Image (cartoon, rainbow, N blue to C red):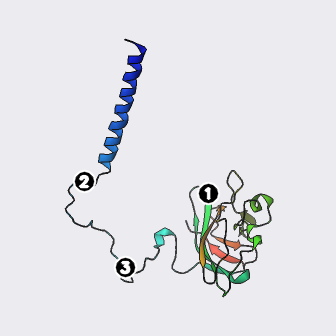
Amino acid sequence: MSIRFTARARRGMVAFTVVAGLALGASGCGGGGGDDGKKPQTSASASKSGGSQPSAQEGQSSQPLAELKGPNSLLLQITSVTRDSGGFVTVNGTLKNDGADTAIIPSNLSGNETEIIKNGSSLGGATLVDSAGKKRYYVLRDTDGRPLTTTGLPALKAGQSLPVFMQFPSPPTSTTDVDFQLPGFATSTIKISG
């Protein structure tokens, strides 16, 4: 037997293995054959209001937890504040232009840290203040120094809104109420869930 024969046999085995794997994957993804024209049954019933509303499981409440007024007719509505098992607190909300003119997002929302500013417009200036523990928590950053928050904020037309998020280190589990601060906006006390 030559080396060529052995190499050809190995290539054949590899090709066979790949084809067998693809065939198995395709059969596993199949719909079970027999398309009898029936529509799939759904387990959830449709809402009578006709609209799709976020559920409480998605961490969104029907009423915002807090509304903070800011410059240029901007309004920040905080919809959820959840503590993750990984030691983070995630604040979700909506940034809305509540005015009649286009609102330019102020640069001070990014904060004044050079590392965050060089990554463009963001909500990197946000903080959580634990008054009882006398600690301030800043927006987390990834390994490249980018803030773990919504970035690249565009100008908002009148009535336009934008979903936003910010991640912070988690205060101790005994701390449930913190003050949320964002430069130029009113301060609000929010409750951490989870």
Classify residue 63 as left or right of residue 72. left
Residue 164, position in %: x, y?
61, 70
> What residue is at 65 percent from the left and 77 percent from the top?
156
Residue 168, position in %: x, y?
66, 62
Which one is nearer the viewer's eye here, 172 or 70?
70
Residue 88 appears in which quarter of the rendering?
A: bottom right
Q: Which residue is mark 1?
A: 87
Label of residue 32 in the image: 2
Classify residue 66 as left or right of residue 130. left
> What residue is at 61 percent from the left and 57 percent from the top?
87
Residue 65, position in %: x, y?
59, 78
Q: Element at badge 3?
A: loop
N-terminal-most mark, 1 or 2 = 2
Give the mark toward the camera: 3 or 1: 3
Q: Which residue is mark 3?
A: 47
Q: Residues within 10 Å of mark 2 (few under 14, many from 20)?
A: few
Asked if disc 1 and disc 2 are in contact, CB closer than 8 Å, the reply is: no
Which one is nearer the viewer's eye here, 107 or 189?
107
Residue that lies at the very extreme toward the top in this rendered image: 1
Q: Element at badge 2?
A: loop
N-terminal-most mark, 3 or 2 = 2
Image quarter in which the N terminus is found: top left
Residue 39 appears in which quarter of the rendering?
A: bottom left
Label of residue 23 in the image: none
Give the mark toward the camera: 3 or 2: 2
**CA distance for labels 1 and 2:** 43 Å
Q: Residues within 10 Å of mark 3 (few under 14, many from 20)?
A: few
Q: Element at badge 1?
A: loop
